Amino acid sequence: MDFRRRDMMAGGIALASSGLLGRPAAAQSRAETLRQVTGNSVNTLDPTMPGSTREAFGISVNIYDRLVSFGRKQGSNGGWVFDPDIIKGELAEKVDTSADGMTFTFHLKRDAKFHDGTPVTAEDVKWSLDRHVAARSLAAVQVQTGGWTKPEQFTIIDPHTVQAKVDKPDRLALPNLCTLYCIIFNSKQAKSHATAQDPWAQEWLKTNTAGSGAYTVEVFKPGEQVILRRNDAWKGGPLPYFRRVICQTIPEAATRASLIEKGDADLSIDLQASDVPTLAQRGRVKLVSTPQFNAFTMVAFNTQMAPFNNVKLRQAVAAALPYQDIFKAALFERGAPLFGASWRGSPTNGKFPQPLPLATNLERARALMAEAGHPNGLDTTFSFNVGSAATSEPLAALVKESLGRIGIRVEIQKLPDAQISTLVTEKKLPFLTETSIAWLPSTDYFFRNFFTGAQRWNYSSWNNAEINALCEKARYELNAAEYERLCKRMIAVLAEEVPVIMLWQPNQDAVMPLGVDGYTYQYHRQVDYRDLKRA
Amino acid sequence: MNATLRHAAWVLRGNPVTLAAGLGVLALALVALLGPSLVAYDPIASNVPQALQPPSAAHWFGTDQLGRDVFSRVVVATRLDLAIAASAVTLSFAVGAVGGAFCGYAGGRLDRWVGRFVDVLMAFPLFVLAMALVAALGNRVENIIYATAIINLPFYVRFARAEVNVRRNQGWVEAARCAGNSHASVVLRFLLPNVLPAMAVQVSLNLGWAILNAAGLSFLGLGVRPPTPEWGILVAEGARFITTGKWWLVVCPGGALMFAVLCFNLLGDGLRDILDPRLRT
Amino acid sequence: MASAPALFGVVVFTFLLMRVLPGDPAVFFASGPNAGEAEIQAIRVQMGLDKPIPEQLVRYLWDIGHGRLGRSMGTGQPVTVDLANRLPASLELTFTALLLALCCALPLGIGAALAPNSLLDHGVRLLCTLGVCVPTFVSGLLFIYAFYYLAGVAPDPTGRIDIFASQPPTLTGFLLVDAALAGDWEAWHSAASQLVLPACTMALFVLAPLARMTRASMLAVLTSDFVRTGDALGLSRRRVVLVYALRNALLPVITIMGIVFSTMLGANVLVEKVFSWPGVASYALDALLASDYAPVQGFVLLMALIFVAVNLLVDLLYGLADPRVSVA
């Protein structure tokens, strides 16, 4: 309840000073305040809490520092995008990687301080990294994809140096430490709120912060708003422009669009695809559209369950979908298509996601239906999430209509978030659409997360011996040419077997007033306020 | 019978609003009956190149995101919407009137228990109850009907109970019993017909409520499954396009929905005049 | 006390209804990449969902007895804290809307009753009925579009107070009251102007039952003996109507007001959603879609309690307005 008291104090101070300072000061602070409006809510200040929303991820990036983070580059459309190939220090001044690629030595910045003024030490780093591998949190499952599984991997060399070791050279070891889960806590502060049942202070950190990041939390009302204040003593990088950031939950997308257009809000990244072109056309706002190159929308089949365990049937569906129509009607063409590639057999490069040779061909689809042993068609259901209805509903309607032409009678199921997550995790849905994202955009990571294993993200429950083997091999393959070869093979198998039909990479449309600059598309698809400024 | 009709005619003459509402309901019923044969386009056939066209001679209410003809969708939706409203209200009316009448007649412990149960239902935030029911049972048409019926039920049970309670010891009921009628027959053949007219007023009002209720559920994503056209879904989808100025997507289905609810409400009012001229409210 | 069984019924019924929801909250909240069985099981244990349902119910009832309503997975807060923070927002909105509706409904109803079957009467009826015909989410969105986006006269429809204004110190949770107590008229003005659109949207919807009831009871009273006596004694028409008739006509209006108030509190889900109003109903809605049991159960219990309290209050008011009724 700490924020409540501060709230009252701020109110009191504003009251006392409003008579003295008057309007100009207020106007000044408005220009230095960024107001983001978002549809979802921030539900925790600790991003590793199970159930954290994406918006909570975004806030945590700004209030905590990591040892290292990704750099940014100019994207194909001129806007900024994150660059997973550049790794820069945040709390670490320098990272030494051993010749065998298994040991990383982090030299901490000596002047870095937590929000309470105490210096950041190796002990804090060790405690935090231990927490990420040992506590029951979202962090543990993420960092294991980089080979981080036990506290013994992290050792303190001296008060400003920490060493981290993996058992096998892993392409994703260092990138994993850049992700937003691997934040560094103020261990003294956190430990003082730990209890016997809760040794990692997870309960306390949900509503309190113990970080060193560029912003501190002024107000946190879960489900309503978060107000951040700039930490002027921040050492993680150049001081951000905005002194104050308000992140407010506005559930109605239409209202968010109006707020931006009227200039009352400064940023929204989750407007409806249908509103964006109109806003851009009216010219009162600035639009930064970035194809989300680490995300993709797909139609997934359950490959372990009849009828879609039949590869011919999946190919028939893939040949029946009217890709261009779906792309236009559902997404208003706001994204990069992943269909319609011209290659056959093997792709020209190993990048993923990349367009696959998918095209509409009803003749072929009907022939495949007969080959699949369903000359009289079949019945199935197609599911999507209520939250994504704006895009998924037209998509589903077109899927139903087009599959009706080859004899597949589809019933559309629109399910609330919790229900669809449950059914997907239990692998009970035959046929669905989802949009998903991989934080670390490398081909083997995509395949490992989405096309192997029993976890929820393997939407198609695909279990292909060759892919499983290729994935395992590619993960530890440090030779670039060989890695490329393995990736190309994986993509070729995917295109042939069609466990999912890749549709597109939706754009992230960040809409802001004309004066706001520096917006960067991040791997977590949220706003890094540190990048932004007002011209 | 003749007297009632004459009275009705007299009331209608002095009350053009009710007359208009009655005609409106009649028109809606006709559209619901003829539905699909009145429209030029298949309401669920897409035509993506023609998406989001404003109203024109070819498409009177314009087209939607998939290029479907909004006029066809609105007209065809009439049948489903009226069916949902009518079945829900019929269900709660039948269960509520019969159940409530028996309880009111029997009195005693059963009556108290049913009374408690109704209190429980009344104490629920009803719209949230409907949402929870649809979420729990799945968003199929029949579940939307059940949910709507359940949230309307308490009113009917209460009403029937109270009305029967007042009458059960009156002389004519006593007489019916003495004439050798069983209790069931007393309730069904004598008491219920006495109570029904007053309840009929409520039916008309509730039809309007039921339509709005279904629309609210649709707005929250708990409505009928796509791509089936239903007014609430059409309005909820159209509401997304308000800021971008595609008004026809919300105004046209919204107008149809409003018209239906308006007719039912005004008719309910009018019915009350006809059935009970003293207590016109 | 007579309402205790009803409250108990509400609690048990909600509990069971939530368990019937097909979504598994543990699965939903363990939504990270690679979230496996272990993580899901951990959340299940944390939420107490690993126990058999009868045991969960007994535990839940025990907790309610001790004033604990569980913890929301969505906000990470205890449900009691969330509800306490959000209830004033809902109540403030509902009270304002009810007041607004009464201010319109009483004159309209009286006017209609004074000239039954006149053009005015039909006009009032049509107007009130029109209000009920528009789904609140449509009227809300249209209001925002017209008054905020096009005309620019309304403040941005984003919560209870201008986000840049300083919030008055929290005493009652009712912003209008808090701001007035603090003497912060700027904040008061901001909070009041934020209230206008959502309150109008809601008032429009309940205008009809209130106006209709006023008209009906006024009609009945106007034909009663004491009014005729008053007229015969040569009292002014104004005095007869506004003093003697109205007081008697208000009785049924009070009854229906109680019902209207309870329904409004539960039914303003859509209004709260459209206006980003941080109230209890939108809180319950989000929780429901996430199959987050505790908040929904807490919300329903709270609504039932309010329902009981309002009924009690109506009985008391009845006693005040009608000395013949004694509250048993």
Image: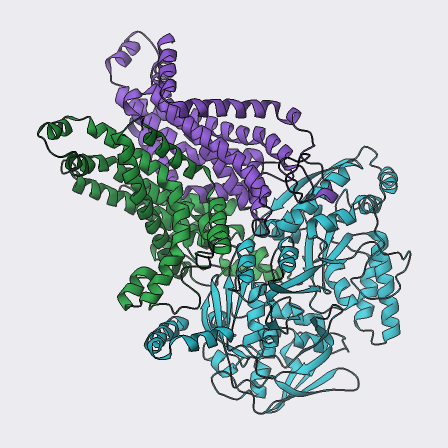
Q: What is the display colour for chain C?
A: green
Locate residue C278 relative to residue A510 in the image: left or right: left
- Which quadrant, please, contains the N terminus of chain B? top left
Q: Position of residue A472 (x, y in %)?
A: 80, 67
Q: How many marks?
A: 0
Q: Nearer the viewer, residue C278 or A191?
A: C278
Q: Position of residue B116 (x, y in %)?
A: 34, 36
Query: Against A265, is C311 above or below?
Result: above
Locate residue B261 relative to residue C214 in the image: left or right: right
Q: Position of residue A243 (x, y in %)?
A: 51, 78
Q: Nearer the viewer, residue A403 or A517?
A: A517
Q: Quadrant of residue A146?
A: bottom right
Q: What is the display colour for chain B?
A: purple
Q: Quadrant of residue A90?
A: bottom right
Q: How is the model colour-coded?
A: by chain
At 86% from the left and 69% from the top, the residue drawn is A484
Query: Against A489, is B71 above or below?
Result: above
User: Is there any visible trace of residue A388 in the rendered image?
Assistant: yes
At 58% from the left and 69% from the top, the residue drawn is A58
- Which quadrant, please, contains the C terminus of chain B? top left
Query: Against B174, is C281 above or below?
Result: below
User: Is there any visible trace of residue C60 in the rendered image?
Assistant: no
Q: Quadrant of residue C171?
A: bottom left
Q: What is the display colour for chain A?
A: cyan
Q: Nearer the viewer, residue C235 or A336?
A: C235
Residue lying farthest left?
C233
Q: Nearer the viewer, residue C297 or C133?
A: C133
Q: Position of residue A312 (x, y in %)?
A: 85, 45
Residue lying farthest right?
A345
Query: Against A282, is B163 above or below?
Result: above
